[in-house]
Image (spheres, rainbow, N blue to C red):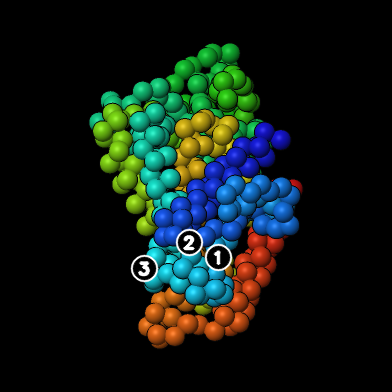
Amino acid sequence: MITALIFIIVIGVLIFVHEFGHFIFAKRSGMKVDEFGFGFPPRIWGIKKGETIYSINLIPFGGFVKILGEDGEEKNNPRSFGSKSFGAKIKVIVAGVLMNFFLAVFLLMAVNFMGLRIGVMDNDMANQIADKKIQIIQVSENSPAQEAGLSLLDEIKGFRINDSTSTVSTVGEVQNLIKQNSGKSIVVLLERSGKLLEKEIVARENPPEGEGALGISLALTGVVTYPWYESIWRGVYDAIMITVNVVIGYGLLFKSLIFEGRLIADVSGPIGIANLTGQAARIGFNYLIQFTALISINLAVLNIIPFPALDGGRAVLLVIEKFRGLPVNKKIEQSINTVGFLLLLSLMVYVTFKDIVRLF
């Protein structure tokens, strides 16, 4: 229930910021906004303030800003979308994408200032971080660690072997202790969400290639923080690098889908993202903020893809209209957008089904 609430809040913020971008740029361009809606119809609740209806709708995964004349009607009305210049219309369309990117920049600035736990790469970094921990970053399938219930991000505090307790401070110490006691039953002392736990495991003598005796990968982690002035440029840099990687990821995904007829990775829908949001929240507030920034950038990149019914698709039609010198036939445009929306809806149903299968 808490995970669902956190997910709704996160998605609500992202949708609001995106649609607010469309809304504010439309207002600044002198367009009349008929409705600012959270979710998709049918409408559950609405209130009219000035000339705009602010509504909450039944289907929560999205939102919309209904602008006078965006479907091509009332071109002679100076406050309609169709009466405005090419530049004004493009600004309104891409404003949502830009707002999602700027939100991510702001959140990443905050994370860099508040501090975030990262993996230690070298001794110089180790000297700059606080609250060092030895954490599990991978648990292999069907390994002793998985069977014993060890989980991602558990902190290894030490071991109890033959009634003798040993504490550890480096990844090397953990690996040596496990290696020295392969084939034996050992008790792993770990901390999870503030609770101390003990897990009895038999270390394998001959583990599969690429796996250790317990079937875990470890990393030394610590919390790093930056002063406010450094957090600013680091937030911008992090947002740009994440955006580049997300674009590359989508490119590879669509390439494999179009040319190979398969997905190279699991794609998460609302249920999968909700589950990941809950995991991030359980790890810590800073991780939730960082994860929200990641989703915001994904939303921005996804929306700018030149696909019908997305902001990128609408922008392409505007560019075509600009170069042709003639408006695109509105019936054709509506048909293209309808087909695009149905395809997106079908993909949403498919990934949601996959999420449910993975969950249960």
For residue 25, above or below residue 10:
below
Residues at marks 2 and 3, CA–CA distance in whole angstroms: 13 Å
Q: Are marks 3 and 1 in contact (CB under 8 Å)?
A: no
Residues at marks 3 and 1, CA–CA distance in whole angstroms: 17 Å
Q: How many marks?
A: 3
Which of the 4 image quarters holds residue 35? bottom right
- Which image quarter holds the N terminus? top right
Which class describes the residues within 10 Å of circle 3: few (<14), some (14-19), or many (20+)?
few
Q: Is residue 221 left or right of residue 284?
A: left
Q: Is residue 271 visible?
A: no
Residue behind mark 3: 87
Mark 3 secondary-structure assignment: helix
Residue 310 percent across, percent down from the top left: 53, 66
Residue behind mark 1: 68
Q: Are marks 2 and 1 in contact (CB under 8 Å)?
A: yes
Residue 268 percent across, percent down from the top left: 60, 54
Which of the 4 image quarters holds residue 142? top right
- The residue located at (51%, 27%) in the rendering is 155
Which class describes the residues within 10 Å of circle 2: few (<14), some (14-19), or many (20+)?
many
Q: Is residue 349 visible?
A: yes
- The residue located at (46%, 52%) in the rendering is 24
Amino acid of disc 3: Gly
> Quick one: 199 or 88, which is closer to the camera?
88
- The residue located at (58%, 32%) in the rendering is 282
> Quick one: 357 or 303, which is closer to the camera?
303
Which of the 4 image quarters holds residue 69? bottom right
For residue 303, above or below residue 186:
below
- The residue located at (39%, 79%) in the rendering is 322
Of tags 3 and 1, the one toward the viewer is 1
> Is tag 2's residue or tag 3's residue first in the polypeptide sequence?
2
> Quick one: 32 or 310, which is closer to the camera?
32
Residue behind mark 2: 31
